[in-house]
Image (cartoon, helix red, strand yellow):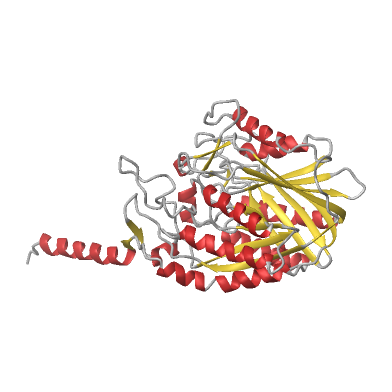
Amino acid sequence: MRRVFNFRSVGLTVFLAIVVLSAICVRHVDVSREPVETALSATLNVAEAVGKEIALAKALPLDAGWAKREITPGFRVPLAGYGVRRGALSQGVESPLWCKALALRTGDKTLVLVSLDLLLIPENFGRMLRQDFHEKTGLPAEALFLTCTHTHSAPNPWDSRVASILLGGGYRKEFGDLLKRSVMDSVREAMDRLGPAELAVGRTWVSELIRNRNGDAPLDAWLEWIAVRKSGGKGVCLVGNYGAHPTVLGHSNMRIDGDYPGYFTRALELRENIDMAMFQAGAVGGACPRPSGAALKIDDFTAARQMGFSLAEKIGNLSRGLSWHRRLELDSRIMEIALPPVQIRIAGSDWVFSPPVARMTGLGRKAPLQVARVGNSLLLGLPVEFNTEISRELKAELRERYGINLWITSDATGFYGYLTPDALYGKRDERGRYYYESSEMSFLGPHAEYYFRRLLEILGESVAGENLLQ
């Protein structure tokens, strides 16, 4: 007997399947603040306890050592940072990539600052490195403070298929192995070179090399730096932190390069008294580069070099005008913070992937946040691209209230998207399109600014304690 194909039944089945899958996989943006308050209540006590512990650090004599290893792959790789590259392989090397480590020790406390010429530090990669560090040095895992330069012209370090799609390039195990070896080799050498040292902190406002892509809104244009020099010697290691996005080189560039941060460190290392220079991506959310004296051209290595060298010039003569300290407070912690619910928008709509689907991308309910105290400086390694406007206000607030010099390092403990100002979340322009910061890349929903402001304010208040830092 011949069967009659029932198009109506098949159509109904497909329709019902779509409805069920949609109910499971997507939902409307949740604008309520209750889930964020729940995450905060689970985190603030931890932040307060961590701050109070760090506040107890005693000023003791400083030892320091530093070292670096090249991490430029000797093979073609996809470059991370622009999804439109779609996994295309690199076409040579314009300038080398580096792993640089600065080890600091006071008494029984050790802190090792590591800077990698990478787009970001994936959460699982960071956890693995800190565990490896603990096993091979015997020091607490929280003593390793990882940061990135956020160059968009380096290989993808994130071994996730979803990340490969978002970042524009697949993960190569050979490169991952190179990173692991280089981090531990540079860390061990830096620690082997520990010796009596002194430290100075500086900052200067550099607004001519940065702009806010959200128009006339304020931004964080502080170039912060820590300089360490060996006692009785001329050698100096300098750590710089700045918030302009390292995107002088655009998506058409397929040559490996450190972008302007690489040229910044190179310019400093050309100085006679600086042995090694490091760079940390600051509050890069919403902040674009603006090379001085030259039009910003896509893939213009001259412009990237010019911006890096111009930024380095802002750091003056380190032998003048700085207060060098032989004794200082040193401590560090890793906090596991409960995050606001992940809400990844779908194609510029008001619909987001449901929490189970979002977790399939590797984004969890918690993420690490690194906290380190170096004298009166409070260094934060965050799992988001911290917004430039929010950073500026928090820095001013903690400095004025408590005497704390706040350092923001973006994408240092994972990547949970942009920290978008709450007023900008979901905002559309006159054509009905989302602003760059207000849609798909804002993973943590409409109250992420409120969450992080409250978290960092409590942390700063706890670090300062009853006796404000002087």
Provide residue 469's location: percent of width, then percent of height.
72, 61
Extreme-right residue of the structure = 232
Provide residue 76's location: percent of width, then percent of height.
59, 41
Foreground residue, 83 or 171? 83
Q: Is residue 37 above or below residue 153?
A: below
| Residue drawn where x is 54% and y is 26% of the image | 295
Would residue 78 appear left or right of 377 to someone viewing this image?
left
Which image quarter holds the C terminus?
bottom right
Provide residue 313's location: percent of width, then percent of height.
71, 34
Residue 134 image-quadrant placement: bottom right
Quick check: can you spot residue 466? Answer: yes
Residue 103 image-quadrant placement: bottom right
Would residue 458 appear left or right of 423 to someone viewing this image?
right
Q: Is residue 387 above or below residue 92?
A: below
Foreground residue, 2 or 354? 354
Number of residue marks: 0
Q: Is residue 68 above or below residue 107?
A: above
Which image quarter holds the N terminus?
bottom left
Provide residue 29's location: percent of width, then percent of height.
34, 60
Quick check: can you spot residue 127? Answer: no
Residue 353 image-quadrant placement: bottom left
| Residue drawn where x is 76% and y is 56% of the image | 187
